[in-house]
Amino acid sequence: MHADLAEQAAEARRLDAADPLAAYRDRFLPAEGVVAYLDGNSLGRPLRAAAERVARFVHEDWGTRLIRGWDEGWIDLSQQLGDRIGRLALGAAPGQVVVADSTTVLLYKLARAAVDHALTRGRREIVLDTDNFPTDRYVAEGIAAERGAVLRWIPADPAAGVTPEQVAAVVGPGTALVVLSHVAYRSGFLADGPEITRIVHDAGAPVLWDLSHSAGSVPVDLDGWGADLAVGCSYKYLGGGPGAPAFGYLATRHQGVLAQPVQGWFGHRAPFEMGPGHEPAPDVRALLSGTPPVFATVPLQAGLDLLDEVGIDAVRAKSVALTGFALRVADALLVPHGVRVASPRDPRRRGGHVTLCRADFADVNDRLWKRGVIGDFRAPDGIRLGLAPLSTSFAEVLAGMTALAEEL
Amino acid sequence: MHADLAEQAAEARRLDAADPLAAYRDRFLPAEGVVAYLDGNSLGRPLRAAAERVARFVHEDWGTRLIRGWDEGWIDLSQQLGDRIGRLALGAAPGQVVVADSTTVLLYKLARAAVDHALTRGRREIVLDTDNFPTDRYVAEGIAAERGAVLRWIPADPAAGVTPEQVAAVVGPGTALVVLSHVAYRSGFLADGPEITRIVHDAGAPVLWDLSHSAGSVPVDLDGWGADLAVGCSYKYLGGGPGAPAFGYLATRHQGVLAQPVQGWFGHRAPFEMGPGHEPAPDVRALLSGTPPVFATVPLQAGLDLLDEVGIDAVRAKSVALTGFALRVADALLVPHGVRVASPRDPRRRGGHVTLCRADFADVNDRLWKRGVIGDFRAPDGIRLGLAPLSTSFAEVLAGMTALAEEL
């Protein structure tokens, strides 16, 4: 064990020394008492620039420009930020992404839009997998109940994710919509986006991708996939802060065709005409409903600045290196103690986090938190290590996992 | 004109000197270059305490507690803040209000819940008035179209608002839901909440009150009215900042009976069990859908602290004094120039803002903005003066209205 640890420590030092993104760690605010923050895929750490932007926003934009801010950029902030996320993280050309609402609400709107349209064509089945994130499953369940659709479940193997073969086996002329996560929230399994999209399209249906665990970590190429619909959250790798607004993607070819049900003034062709009768915007604004969450998007703007500076490919390269290192450490220090690795070993099938399992991990995680080692317990027996590439060093990964080993 | 102005200036001085809330103006951040901010009912000004709270939140809560914040208060923040708004501003006992989403999304959820339930009883009519805020009308229109309900319009007289008699004339055994604003967004007309609620209840239907222009300005007594459903926004008199989250009220007796359609993980009985199958929370949490907008509620917390310190009755007393003064100034300085007062003269029927009309007011408002006098143009011909009691002095009202007089 001591020899192993020394070897891992030497490797961590080598990797940190060679890491071209190492200096970016200093862009984040320090967290006193935190030994290792290994939950950047649940909540990203705040940038110093986010703190500065927020202070400036309160004093200058909100405090001094006041209501004039609407004429000076707030009015189309949802689309501006959407376009930026699209370009930096999603492979989406302008005019297809908005920032608004929560992931759940945008999921509802997009799924309703797709299912309502499919029902007019006699397609009634919503396909999803048993390992999808709870809110995705609950939203689909609710829509099925209210619209008279049916759920068609793919029995996901948590260790292997949802495969193209599994999707091909269930889609067909009855498929209304397929709802999948690109990176599985527990295992970190990375689905084959382009191949699954192609299979579902061949069956005549659209896919709604949940990109919550991809955006800002794993490059996505929505336009390249010929994707239809997507949602995701901005408080993980994009740095938006706790409960930050979500993003939604509606491919250009579906705009004006798929209609979402929560029609409010910001989805109107001309909100400030305040006229009688709703006239939906002819573009991606039709996804919007209420007043955009201007203040809530300020930290996200700092996160996008950084992603623009670094580039998603460099982020992904470090992400693969971090998760690969974590797996090697797990094999050396934890597997001998009965820990099971629940994440894919093939980096092409792995997102930005790694999940390790043992029956007593609920208790172990409590003890780690007390030591300032912050991972995320995921029932029934997983500790999930979310390794945000821009704020996490290899030494930090090792410090956290060494503490974990000590608790076993 | 000069004599009039001197008299008004003397009155403004008298009123400011006698104003028990005068000192609270210093609690707000200064706005350089702004001569008069008369749009506090569109966007409230930021408190110094809000700026401090936000900075502390980014560094300490988000930056240092990180994901542990969920266990340390974030998890039920929506209800905690809802309870506070309920107690301080709405006359609602705990357990009936949440803070979440946008006003539009909460309107949709609550209206859908009520209409879906009404349809099972054969009630198909959604009653609303032609002067209601656009998003309220658009949401109702969308729900009518998707659920096969019909809209029954009350032709509102913008100068007189919606009267109990008008409501009584249209409700009956076919009424599914009545959707009304408590304070009309243009005229400032204040509807008779308890009387209208009684009339609609006698017809066997619920009312959904939009309290966006009331909350934090006009006391509301939802429980006392026997109210059913309400929504409102927090970025006006409550100080939440641009695009801050909304609040929704679901009376205890309707909980577990009316079900909203956007079922996500935070509306689940136990979100972090992440179990299969949605089990709605048995309480007001069933109104929630996605991850609560934690960061976005930080300024609101400062606004509620101040409201707690001052009390809604003192706020209302100053609000009535401010709008009364504005009407006297309008009569003296503006009406002689062909300006029409579009707001009620009876303070019992008036909310916290006053609207003045003249055919050229779109241009006049542009010129006022250039002078640092910030009101809000409302088509076709109104300048709306929103007089936030805690941040507005009588001298400021006079300065703005004198500038307006000079532009005529």
Image (cartoon, coloured by chain):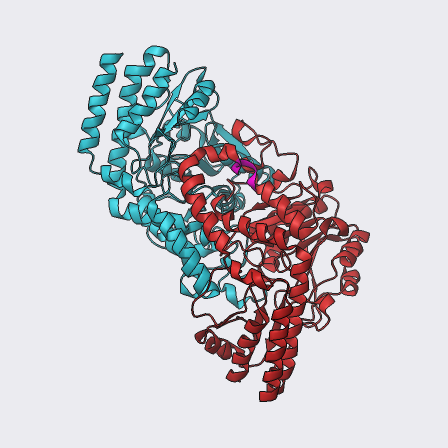
Chain colours: A cyan, B red
In this view, the residue in front, B192 or A52, is: A52
- The residue lying at 67 percent from left, 55 percent from top is B209
Q: Position of residue A214 (x, y in %)?
A: 36, 37
- The residue lying at 42 percent from left, 38 percent from top is A210
| Quadrant that contains the C terminus of chain A | top left
Q: What residue occupies the far right of the structure in this picture?
A: B202
Asked if residue B381 shows in the view, the reply is no
Give the total of numbered labels: 0
Q: Position of residue A33 (x, y in %)?
A: 38, 31
Give the quarter of the image for residue B16. Answer: bottom right
| Quadrant that contains the N terminus of chain A | top left
In this view, the residue in front, A146 or A369, is: A369
Q: Which residues are magenta?
A: B73-77
Q: In the drawing, does residue B96 fall left or right of residue A186? A: right
In this view, the residue in front, A357 or A61, is: A61
Q: In the drawing, does residue A262 fall left or right of residue B191? A: left
- The residue lying at 74 percent from left, 58 percent from top is B193
Q: Position of residue B34 (x, y in %)?
A: 46, 70
A398 w.r.t. A27: above or below: above
Q: What residue occupies the far front of the structure in this picture?
A: B17
Residue A293 falls within the magenta-colored stretch? no
Q: Position of residue A237 (x, y in %)?
A: 36, 39
Asked if residue A60 shows in the view, the reply is yes
B126 w.r.t. B189: above or below: above
Give the quarter of the image for residue A119. Answer: top right
Residue B74 falls within the magenta-colored stretch? yes
Q: In the drawing, does residue A264 fall left or right of residue A305? A: right
Give the quarter of the image for residue B8. Answer: bottom right
Tell me which secondary structure the magenta stretch mostly adopts: helix
B217 w.r.t. A145: above or below: below
